[in-house]
Image: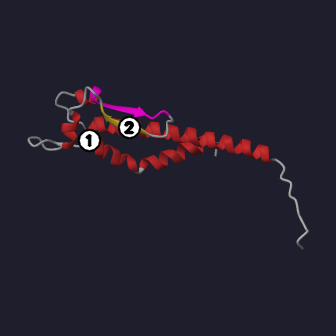
Amino acid sequence: MAGRRQSVRIEGLDQLRGAAARIQDQVRRGIQRAVTESLDAVEAEAERRAPTRTGDLQRAGIGTEVDDDGLAGDVGFTRDGFYGLFQEFGTSQHPAQPMLGPAAEAERAELPRRMIRHVTRELGT
């Protein structure tokens, strides 16, 4: 048995690689859409929860930034809304009025559903 060899020829490997690359691109696009939508939802919920004495935090104090690859991002206080940190965490003279934390927590369960919905849509299934 030492001298016996078998060979296998796989046909269609190039097509398989192409299909896998297309699927990878579709999944990436779906996740990018879900991440952007999720960040926007956190921003909107944080703005809704923000204290409204002047309304500045709702207008320009909270912003969203998506990473270059579109697979992650941040929601936080803008330069003009830096004082939102004092609202979020409180001070020795002012109790915390969190808005970002609760908004992110509210979105935590929704993000996987968004990903499934957008990836499924991209894949056309």
Position of the N terminus, as image quadrant, is bottom right
Q: Where is 79 relative to 107, above or below?
A: above
| Magenta span | 59-68
The residue lying at 89 percent from left, 64 percent from top is 5
Q: Is residue 112 above or below residue 4?
A: above
- Name the residue: 32% across, 36% down: 76
The residue closer to the viewer here, 119 or 74, is 74
Say if the magenta span includes residue 20. no
Which one is in front, 113 or 68? 68
Identify the residue under disc 2.
74
In the rendered image, which residue does mark 1 sit on? 99
106 or 91: which is nearer to us? Answer: 91
* In-image side of 24 versus 104 (left or right): right
Chosen colour scheme: secondary structure
The quarter of the displayed image where residue 43 is located: top left
Instruction: Say which of marks 1 and 2 sits in front.
Output: 2
Q: Amino acid at mark 1?
A: Met
**Within-10-Å neighbours for mark 1: few <14, some 14–19, many 20+:** many
Looking at the rendering, which quadrant does residue 99 occupy?
A: top left
